[in-house]
Amino acid sequence: MSSTGPTKPIVSPSLLIVIAFISVCLWHIADFRTGPDSWTQKKLKSIVRSGYARSHRKSVETLMKDFKSPDRNKRYSAARQVSRFGVDAEFCVPELKLLLRDPDPYVRYAAAFSLAGFNVLDRWVIDNIIGALNQGNPKLQLDAINALRGRYPFPSETIPFLIHLSKSNEKEVQQASMEVLAYAQSDDPRISEALKRGLKEKDEKTRQMAVISLMHREPQSVSLQQIKTALNNPDRDVRFQAINSLDSSHLLTNKEVEQILLERLKDKDDSVREAATRMIYRTSLGEGMVVDLLIKQLQDKSKWVRRTAAGGLAIKAGASEKAIPALTELAQSETDRSWARKTIAQIEKAKKR
C-alpha cells in the first residue's frame, strides 16, 4: 500500500460553494455597514464561524464512519484527512486513538500523524511515528517528519532517527530532518553535529538549509557571508526561510543584512516579500524610514504583504500618523478594509495618549 490513500468528497462541492458565497456576503455586509468593531459585525462573524464549525463537524463525523470500514484504504484516507479540520475535529481524538492498534501499519501511521497534529504525543503515537521514520519510503518519512514540526514538548525519542535521516540520500528527507532538528527542545550535541555536517554537502540547497537550521539552533556558528548567501539564494524556499531565521540571528541589525532585506521587499516571490515586510520593523533602521517602507508595501499586489505592512504600522502606531491617508485609501477595498481600519484605530488611539 502506498503512503497516500484515496480521497473522496466529504461534502457536495456545490453545497460548499453556496455556503462559502453566503458566508463571504455576510462578512462583507457586516464590515461595510457597521464597521470592524461593531456588535453587529462581531455577531454576524460569529454566526459565520459557527456555521463553518457545524459544517466541519458533519464532515469529520462522515470521516469517522470510515474509521471502522473493512476497507483499509478508507480507514487510511479518513485518518489522514481528519486533521485538516483543525480544532473543529478534536472531538474525534478518542476514536482516532483506536486506529493506533489497526492491523495495517499505514493506517496506524496515518492516525499517529493526525494525532500529532492535535499535539497528542503519547507512547503509541511516538512509536508509530518512529516506525514511519524507519520505513524506506521517502514520502512516508516526510509525512512523519512533518508530523513532528512545531511539537512541544518535542519527543526526544525521535531525535536519533531524525539525525540518521539527516544523512539520507533523499534530499527532501535530509533537508526536512535538519529543519525539524533545529527546533527540537534538546541539548543533544549530536544535533549540532548533524547540522554542521550538512554544511559540507555537495548539494547547494542542502548546504543552505543547514545554514538556516544553524541560524535557529546555534546562530553564533553562522557567518555573515553564509547568511548573505542564503538571503540571496535563487531558490525562493531558501530565501524565505533565511529571512524567517533572522529572528534568531545576532545579525538582524547588521547593515549589510538590512540592505539585503530592503532588496527582498521587492522580491519577485510574494511569500519572500511578506517575510521581508514582517522582519523590516525589527531592524535598527530609523522609525521614520521603517514607516515609509511599510506605507510603500501597502501598495503591494499581494494581500498578505499589504496585511503584514498594516500590522507593522499598527505596531509602530505612535510614529505612523502619516500612514493614515494610504490606509484610508486601502480601506476602500473589501479585501483590505478590516486590516486598514484596525490599523487606523490603533494609530488614532496612540495619538490620544
Image: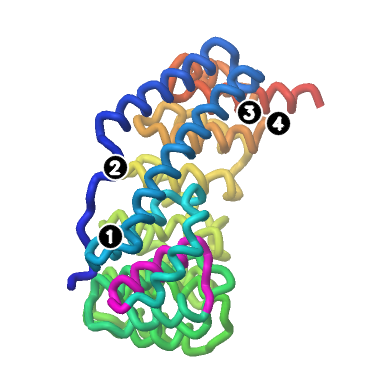
In the image, what residue type sits under mark 2? Lys
**Earlier residue among tags 1 and 3:** 1
Question: Which residue appears farthest toward the left when viewing the image?
Answer: 1
Q: Percent x, y for residue 43?
A: 60, 23
Give the residue at mark 4. Answer: 318
Q: Which mark is residue 77?
A: 1
Span shown in magenta:
103-122
Q: Could you say which quadrant of the image residue 103 lies in? A: bottom left
Q: Is 193 situated above or below 210?
A: below
Q: Percent x, y for residue 313?
A: 59, 33
Q: Percent x, y for residue 266?
A: 36, 40
Give the residue at mark 3. Answer: 320
In the image, what residue type sits under mark 1? Ser
Q: CA distance from mark 3 to mark 2?
A: 27 Å
Mark 2 crowd level (few <14, some 14–19, many ≥20, 10 Å Cα): few
Task: State the residue at coordinates (54%, 64%).
Answer: 249
Mark 1 crowd level (few <14, some 14–19, many ≥20, 10 Å Cα): many
In the image, what residue type sits under mark 3? Ser
Q: CA distance from mark 4 to mark 2?
A: 31 Å
Q: Could you say which quadrant of the image residue 149 lies in? A: bottom left
In the drawing, does residue 266 fall left or right of residue 115? left
Task: State the residue at coordinates (30%, 75%).
Answer: 141
Q: CA distance from mark 1 to mark 3?
A: 50 Å
In the drawing, does residue 347 fall left or right of residue 271? right
**Earlier residue among tags 2 and 1:** 1
Give the structural element (helix, strand or loop) at label 4. helix
Give the residue at mark 2. Answer: 268
CB atoms of marks 1 and 4 within 8 Å: no
Q: CA distance from mark 3 to mark 4?
A: 6 Å
In the image, what residue type sits under mark 4? Gly
**Earlier residue among tags 1 and 4:** 1
Q: CA distance from mark 1 to mark 4?
A: 51 Å
